[in-house]
Amino acid sequence: MEMTRERFEELVGDALDEVPGELLGLMNNVVILVEDDPPPTEPDLLGLYEGHALTDRGWDYAGVLPDRIFIYRRPILQICDTDEDVVDEVAVTVVHEIAHHFGIDDARLHALGWG
C-alpha cells in the first residue's frame, strides 16, 4: 500500500479526533508523533508508547520530558491493502498507544479487541 506521509498524518489526526474529548483532556505531558520506521530491532512494530503511564506517576513526577507515542507509517502500510484498511489500523494503533498512557497493558487491550 502506498500513501504520502501527509495523508498518513491526516489519518492520525482523524483518529485522534475520534477519541472522546474527556479522555484526551486527561492525557498529560504526552506528544504523538508519526515516524516512517520503528526501531531496527522491532521492524514490525506499528506503534510505541515511551514514558511513564499516568498510573505509575507519583508525587515525585515533575520536570520530565513529555511521554511519546509513536505511530509508524511504513509497517502499517505494509499490512494494509486499501485506504480503508489504513484508516482502521491507524485508529486501532492510536487507541492502543493512548491506552498505554493510561496504564492499560497489552493483555487487557487484546482482551478488549484493541490488540
Image (tube, helix red, strand yellow):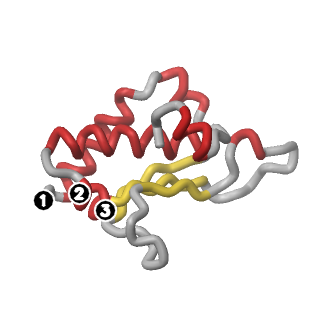
To which residue does mark 1 refer? 2
Q: Residues at badges 2 and 1 in contact (C-beta under 8 Å)?
A: yes
Quarter of the image with the N terminus is: bottom left
Between residues 31 and 3, which one lies in front from this camera angle? Answer: 3
C-alpha span from label 1 to label 3: 11 Å
| Label 2 vs 1, first from the N-terminus | 1
C-alpha span from label 2 to label 3: 5 Å
- In the image, residue 110 above or below residue 76: above
In the picture, measured across the screen, residue 20 lies left or right of residue 29, that is: left
Residue neighbourhood size for the residue with mark 1, other residues' Cα within 10 Å, grouped as few (<14), some (14–19), many (≥20): few
Q: Residue furthest right?
A: 59
C-alpha span from label 2 to label 1: 7 Å
Give the percent coordinates (x, y) of residue 28: 62, 40
To which residue does mark 2 refer? 77
Q: How many marks?
A: 3
- Amino acid identity at mark 2: Leu
Q: Residues at badges 2 and 3 in contact (C-beta under 8 Å)?
A: yes
| Label 1 vs 3, first from the N-terminus | 1
In the picture, measured across the screen, residue 98 lies left or right of residue 53, that is: left
